[in-house]
Image (cartoon, rainbow, N blue to C red):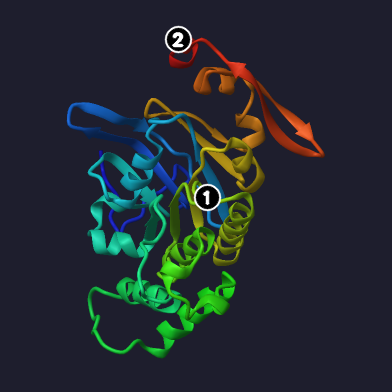
Amino acid sequence: MSFATSSSPQLSTSGRAVSGLSTANLSMHYGNRQVLDRVDLPPLNAGTVTALIGPNAAGKSTLLRGIAGLHKTSGQVLLDGVELNRLPQVERAQRIVYLPQSLPERTRLCAFEAVLSAAMAGHRGAGFAPGRPSPAVLDNVEQVLVDLDLTSLADRPIDALSGGQRQLVGLAQALVRQPKVLLLDEPTSALDLYHQCQVVEAITRATRERQLITLVVVHDINLALGFSQQVVVLHHGRLAAAGPALEVINEHLLRDVYGVDGSLEQVRGRPLVMVDGRLPLHSALG
């Protein structure tokens, strides 16, 4: 098998470079336990949000970390035809930013300083000279704060912010690095409904305006239905389904993957998963 390099993008059967983010036969082990088993993600395109869903311990967070290069994997991770596993981690990190599930740590740094630190970190590498940030870096920080409606909080210490505000600062730290791919691990899990909406709206807007490829781990299927263009479903470390949410999420998937008796209904013109109850445990594990 031949592998693409950063100077030699993979070509489709038509001879054109493959666009988007995809994986081929992506596998990963923790010791003797296989966590990901030959996951083939279809191409995820710029300007779209994909929800990564599935039961607990399905491998969702591990898949994000594998794509980001934070876990050693076998198989391929392709971005616009470039095989990322062949790139140095520094170069890979310039294209892909991973935001973990935990909120930004409490610190006396103000929001502006936290975002500026992330911007400076994103410029490290060949030719990086420590010191005062350039006007271009400062302009980038200011624009991200404006885009996420954080300018009024710029001089507030991180440890004085609410959970939703801290999550937005974490998102700003990711966006200021100007990635092509944004990987978010349950960015709304610790938030109330208001701040869930605030963060989801910010993710959706940034993805569209910056033409990002955004992959988000979400436990709430109804939340995923509300903001994602497509879903990827993992089950026991394998790809169970992928595609438009309304085509993928149905009573068969709810039964076979989640082990519940449910259906997809329309409520006030919007899709909503309705669950009647759980099935016997052996049904969910089959």
Q: Can residue 17 be seen in this view?
A: no
Q: Is mark 2 on a helix, strand or loop?
A: helix
The answer for how far apart the CA atoms under marks 1 and 2 are is 31 Å
Percent from the top left, x then y, of residue 175? 46, 67
Q: Which amino acid lies under the numbered mark 2 shown in the image of this protein? A: His
In the picture, measured across the screen, residue 117 lies left or right of residue 286, that is left
The quarter in which the C terminus is drawn is: top left
In this view, which residue lies farthest toward the right?
Answer: 268
Check contact, mark 1 vs mark 2: CB within 8 A.
Answer: no
Vertical relation: 72 (above or below) 125: above
Instruction: State the residue position of label 1.
Output: 188
Q: Which residue is drawn at 56% across and 58% down?
A: 203
Vertical relation: 51 (above or below) 158: above
Instruction: State the residue position of label 2.
Output: 282
Q: Which amino acid lies under the numbered mark 1 shown in the image of this protein? A: Thr
Q: Residue at x 41, y 38 (%)?
A: 60
Corner quadrant of residue 270: top right
In this view, which residue lies farthest toward the front?
Answer: 160
Crowding around mark 1 (Cα neighbors within 10 Å: few <14, some 14 to 19, many 20+) is many
In this view, which residue lies farthest toward the left?
Answer: 31
Residues 16 and 87: in front is: 87
